[in-house]
Amino acid sequence: MYLRSSPCASIQRKGKRIMKLNLRTKLIGSFVIMLFLMVVVGLMGTHTSKTIRDRLGNIIEQDLKPANILGDVARRAGFIRANSLLHLLTGSIDDMNRYESEVADWAGKINTDLDTLENIFKDQATLDKLAEFRTAWETYLRVWREQVVPLSRTNRDEEVFPLAIKSGAGGMAAREAMYKLGGLHDANVAAANHSLKLADQDSRKSQYILSALILLAIILGLAFGIRQGSIIAGSVNTVSKAAQLVAAGDLDQRVMVKTGDEIESMANSFNTMTFKLKTMVEELQREITERRRAEDRLRESEQWLSTTLRSIGDAVIATDAEGLVTLMNPVAEDLTGWDELETAGKPLEDIFNIINDQTGGRAENPVTRVLQKGVVVGMADHTVLIAKDGTKRHIADSGAPIRDEEGEIIGTVMVFRDITERKQAEEELRKHRDHLEELVQDRTEALRESEKKTKQVKEYLELQVDRMPIGLILWDAEFHVTSWNPAAEKIFGFTAEETLGKHPYDLVVPKEAQPQVDDIWRRLLEGDMTAYSTNENITKDGGTIICEWTNTPLKETDGTVLGVLSMVKDITEQKKLEEQFRQSQKMEAIGTLAGGVAHDFNNLLTVIIGNSQLALMDVIKDESLRKKIEEIEKAGDRAASLTRQLLAFSRKQIITPRVLDLNELLTGIEKMLGRLIGEDVELLTIPGPALWQVEVDPGQMEQGIMNMAINAKDAMPQGGKITIETANTDLDENYFRKHGIEGEKPGHYVMLAVSDTGIGMDKETQEHIFEPFFTTKEVGKGTGLGLSTVYGIVKQNNGFVWVYSEPGQGSTFKVYLPRAEGAADSEEKQQLPVIELDGSETVLIVEDDNGLRKFAQEVLLLHGYKVLDAENGEDALRVSQAHEGQIHLMITDVVMPRMGGKELSEKLQPFYPRMKVIYMSGYTDNAIVEHGVLAPGLNFLQKPFTPESLALKVREVLDAEN
C-alpha cells in the first residue's frame, strides 16, 4: 500500500518542471531572500542616516558654530570694557598689571574669533558688518592702551576721566557694532533652527520609507516560509501517517513522496526501514519459535538434570558462602531426617550433626574446613551422622568449594553416603525415588510456572557438577559416554572431548575386568538400583588405579532406562594406606604375641638353665651325666638367645640408650663384621663426614648391624660386596608420603645404609621380611628372626627402616635414627669389685611360676638367706603379715594375676619402709619402664637368669646405699 504526498516541492513554469531543490537548498534560498531584503533596507537606512548627518554637519558648521563664536566675541568684549573701567578706578599697580594682561589675552581671542568668522561667512553683507565691528573695536583698544592707561598709572584723574569720556565715543561705536553683531548672532541661530526643522522632516520621511521596506521584507519572508513549510509539513505528515500505520502493525506500508529533497530521502529510508523491519519481524518470529523449542529442550534438560541429581546414590547438600543450606537431595533428606523445604537457609551445623566414631566427640564439619581453607576435603569414613530423630549412621563424607568465573567461593557442595547397611540404603533409595517420581508428576505444572527458578537451579546444579570432587560420568543406554565432568578428567586423564560417544572398554576398563562390568551393566539395564563396585581401571597414560564406582540407572516415569549415572572416586592412595595400616597392625600383633611367648618361655628357660647349673654343682664325678647336663644348659642358652631376639622384635627389652657417634660404633665392630661375613664377601664402610649424634643402646645397635650384615651375606651365596655407609639427612613430609611411611615426624635424621649385590627380593617377599620366623632359606639354615630383631631394635630406639630391592639387583636397608642433641656419653667402664655372694637377710620371693620360684628359693638358701615365698600378690600379703620380723628384700615378678609386682610393692612399703625390691620379668612392663628404659631407682632382673646372676643381683641390691 502506498501513501502519496499532495503538495509538490518542484518549481513549475508553463507546466514544465524546471528545477528541483532539496530541503537544505530551499532553506538556504529562503534565508538568502530574507538576507537580500535586509541588506536593501540596511543600505537605504545607511544612506538616509548619512544624508541626515551631512545636513546636521552643515547646520552646525554654517549656523550654530558662527552663532557660538559671535556669542564668545560679545562676552569677551564685555569683559574688556569692564576691566578698562576697573583699571581707572583702582589705585593698585598690581591690579593694573593684571587688568592689562587679561585685556590683552581677551583681545587676542576676539581677533582669532573674528578671523574664524571671516572664513565661515561667505556673503559680503555679513563680512562688511564684521569689518565695521573690527575697525571700531580696534579704535577703542588703541585709545585705551595709548592714552587712558598711561594717565591711569600716574593717577592723573583730572586728565584720565575726560579722556575716558572722550574715548567713550569709540566705546559707544563699538557697543553699537556689538549690537549689530548680536543681531547677526540671532539671525544665525534662527537659520540653524529652520535648517534643523527641515532635516527633521526629511528624517521622518526616511523612517516611513524604511518601515515600509522592512514590513515588505517580513511579508515576503513569511509567505515564502509558509509555502515551504506547507510543502515540508505535507510530506512529513504523509510519512507520519505511514509510521502510525506501521506502529499499528501494518508492515506493508510504503510512502510515495516526490519532493526531490531530504524528505523524499527520508521517505525512501522509511520504506527501506519498513521492509527491513518486516524482514526482522519475520526473523524474530522464527527466532521466537526456535527459542520456544529451545526452552522446551531446556525444560527437558532441567528435568533430566533434576532427575540426575535426585538419582545420585550418595547424599548431596549444597550451601552458600555463609554455610547456609541451599540444596539438599532426597538421599541427604533421608539420612539426616530433615526435609529440603525446612532446611533452606539454615546453617549446615543445625541439620548435619556428626561425631567422631572413635572418640564420640563432635567432628569437624567438612564444609567449615572448605570455607576456611578453600580446598577440597577428601572422603573421610570415620564419622557418625546423628539424624533428626536421633538415629546414628556411619557415613563417609567429603566437601568441595563452588567457585564462580572469577574464582571466588560462592558456596560448597558436600557428598556423603551411608556405609552402615548398603542393602538397607538401597531399599530406602528405591522407596524415596518412587516418592520423588510421584512428586515430580504432581508438581509438573508448578515447575512450568517457575521456569525461571528452574533455570537458575539448573545452572547452579551444572556448576555444582563441574565443581564436585567426585567423578561424574553419564552413559546412554548403549553404554557410551554422554557427559564427563572435570573430576573424571583428573582421575583418568581423558578430556571430555576425548570420551564423548566412546565405550568404557575403549577408555578405562582393562580386558580382564570386562566380564564383571558386563554383569553390572546388565543388572543396571534390568532396573536394579544403585550398584557399588571397586575395580582396577586404566588411565590415559597406561597406568593402573583402583576406583570405587557407584552406578545408578536413570529411568523414565514408565521405568524405561535412559542411561546410567556413575560416580567414581580414585581410592588408590586409600588402598595403599589401608595396606600399610594392615601391615602395621599385623606387625604390632605379631610383636605382642612374640613378647607374650618370650615371657612364658623365659620362665621355663630360667628353671631349665638354673637347675642345670645347680645340677652341675652336684655332679662332679659322673662325667657322662655332666656332659648331658651341659648339653641341656647349652640348649637353654640357645633358646634364651631366641627369646632375646623375640623381645627385641616386640620392643620389650630393657635398653640403656646413650648419645654416641655411629661412625665410632662401626669402627669398633668392623673387624668382627669382617670375620662374620667371611673372606668371599668384600666389606666397604663409608662413614659420613661431621655425622650427627644419635641416642641409642649401643649393644642393640651392634646386634642390629650384624644381623643386617649376615642377612646381606646370605643373599650372596657366590660372594659379592657389602657396603655400609652413614650420612646426615633431612626428611620432610614429601619423603614420607612418597615412600608410604606413616607415624614418623619430619626432621633431622642420621642414616645407616647396608647394601648388598645379592639376589634381591620381590614385592611379596618385602612385605614379610620383618615378620618373626619368616625366612627364604632352606630348613635348618635360619631362624627367621634376624631382620625382625633389626625392626624391633630400630623401632625401640625411635627410628624406622626403609627397604629397597629388586630381584637380581641386590638390596638396600636404610635405618633412620633421629638426631640427638648434646655431646657423646663417656664409654669409661667402672671396675666392679669382688662381691661376697652369701648373706643372712630375709628375702621374700613372689612368683606365680612354681618351678621358677622353687629354683630361686633353693639358690638363695644355698647362699645362707632366710627365704619366704608366695605364689601371687595376695599370697605375699598374707605371708608378710604372718611373718614376725624384718623383710630386707622382696624379689617379685612384674606381671602376675590379680596383682602385679609394682602394686604389691606399694602396699608392702608402709609396713616395711626399709625393704628393697628387685623386679624380674621375661619382658618389660609399662608399670616399671617407659619406652623400654628403666625408671630411676628401680632394680630389674631379666629372665632367664642363672644362680650366679641371681645371687650377685641380690647382694648388690642389699649392699647398695638407700
Image (cartoon, rainbow, N blue to C red):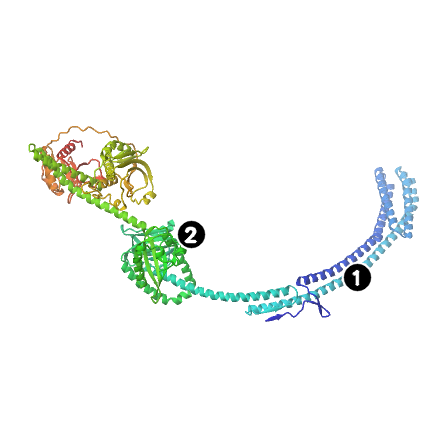
In three-dimensional space, the C-alpha distance between marks 1 and 2, rounded to whole angstroms, equals 90 Å
Q: Which of these two is toward me, 821 or 260? A: 260
Quadrant location of the C terminus?
Answer: top left
Q: Judge whether residue 564 can be spotted in this image.
A: yes
Quadrant location of the N terminus?
Answer: bottom right
| Circle 2 residue | 408
The percent position of residue 780, horizontal first and vertical second, equals 18, 41
The percent position of residue 751, horizontal first and vertical second, equals 30, 37
The percent position of residue 827, horizontal first and vertical second, equals 24, 30
The percent position of residue 410, horizontal first and vertical second, equals 41, 54
| Circle 1 residue | 205
Q: Nearer the viewer, mark 1 or mark 2?
A: 2
Residue 57 lies left or right of residue 452; in this view the side is right
In the image, farthest residue toward the front = 718
Mark 2 closeness class: few <14, some 14–19, many ≥20 residues within 10 Å: few
- For residue 915, the mark is none
Residue 310 sits in quarter: bottom left
Q: Judge whether residue 943 can be spotted in this image.
A: no
The reply to whether callout 1 and callout 2 are in contact (CB within 8 Å) is: no
Q: Secondary structure at mark 2?
A: loop
Q: Which of these two is toward me, 394 or 307? A: 307
Position above or below: 14 against 187: below
Position above or below: 182 against 212: above
Q: Which of these two is toward me, 798 or 194? A: 798
Residue 458 sits in quarter: bottom left
Q: Secondary structure at mark 1?
A: helix
Q: Earlier in the sequence, mark 1 or mark 2?
A: 1
For badge 2, the amino acid type reads Glu
For badge 1, the amino acid type reads Lys
In the image, farthest residue toward the left = 621
Mark 1 closeness class: few <14, some 14–19, many ≥20 residues within 10 Å: few
